[in-house]
Image (cartoon, rainbow, N blue to C red):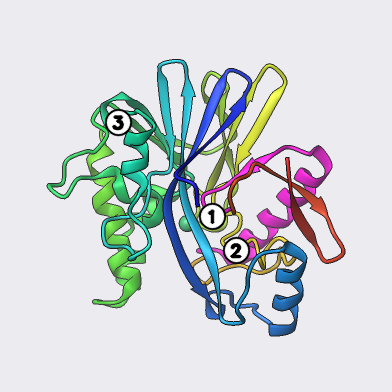
Amino acid sequence: MQDIITTRVGRFDILTLTDGFGRAPNALFPDYDADRAHAAAAQSGEAYDGETVSVPIQGFVIRDGDDITLVDAGAPDGYSPTTGAFMDNLAKAGIAPAQVTRLAMTHLHVDHVGQMVRPDGAKTFPNAQLIHGAGDWDHFFSDAVYDRTRPGGRERASLDVSRRACAPYADTRREIGVETEFAPGLTMVPLPGHTPGHSGIRIDDGGDSLLIWGDTIHSAAFQVAEPDWGVLFDVDPVQARATRRALFADLAASGLPILGPHVPQPGPWRVEKARIGYRLTPA
Ligand SMILES: [Zn+2]
């Protein structure tokens, strides 16, 4: 993986910052079928060893002159032996945390909000407003949701980390429930299902556009050819599937290029119809 990849969209620079990667076992995909998985991976050109697929983890800087927006902010410390590069790569890009004015989060899962808080509990980005899709805060801070997770279990630990990362920003946060331009040329686009407030961020300038599509997929090997395949931790799997299907159809028709936190490098990509479902082609 490259540390930093720059994509130009009109006046904006979009920097893809690598955090690292994880490996997802077949069991992450509840609809997994071995024959279909091998066929999907072969069409995608992605490596598949029959048991796991690689899941890149990335965040994005949107630079508009001196104005810096982050879209997602890396996995937490200790998340995996193969993650943890996000803050180093932000520094390599020449950006100090205090320069970040917005944290536009695709959703509040740990691998997206992990570096928003320092070990001492203070904000990593002291001048940033947290912007996220409506429904995520209520979900991640819900007592009912929390009480349904098992004490000592992975889901509860994950909620604890998300809560700790987001809580310091409670005073300035903004929730967005319908497609909204939250800064000049930057629009939050609700893509619900993976989490209630899961959203994409669209960048538009001078006839140029690009969508950072959040966790529309976790595996380019499987889910582009098989858009019905969700992941175990989709909060609403039926809605996530419907959202992914509708978005793929829209993107195949419009040709709008995409990037994503779990999309292969280098990108950006277009979605096009293929023999099986869809495939990604370089934009
Ligand atoms: Zn994710």
User: Mark 3 highlights which residue?
Assistant: 172
Looking at the magenta stretch, what is its main secondary structure? Answer: helix
Residue 109 shows in this picture: no
Which residue is drawn at the image coordinates 37% and 41% (left, top)? 89
* Mark before the other along the chain sequence, 1 or 2: 2
Q: Which amino acid type is marked by label 1?
A: His
Q: Secondary structure at mark 2?
A: loop
* Pointers 3 and 2 in contact (C-beta within 8 Å): no
* Mark before the other along the chain sequence, 1 or 3: 3
Outermost residue toward the left in this view: 120
Which residue is drawn at the image coordinates 60% and 27% (left, top)? 8
Find residue 41 and report its horizontal and vertical position in percent: 70, 70
Quarter occupied by residue 10: top right
Find residue 87 and report its horizontal and vertical position in percent: 31, 43
Q: Secondary structure at mark 3?
A: loop
User: Mark 1 highlights which residue?
Assistant: 262
Q: Is residue 13 magenta?
A: no
Q: Which amino acid type is marked by label 2?
A: Ser
* Ligand 1 within 8 Å of the CB at mark 1: yes
Q: Which amino acid type is marked by label 3?
A: Thr
Point out the stretch of residues depicted in magenta.
Answer: 235-263
Find residue 197 and report its horizontal and vertical position in percent: 49, 48
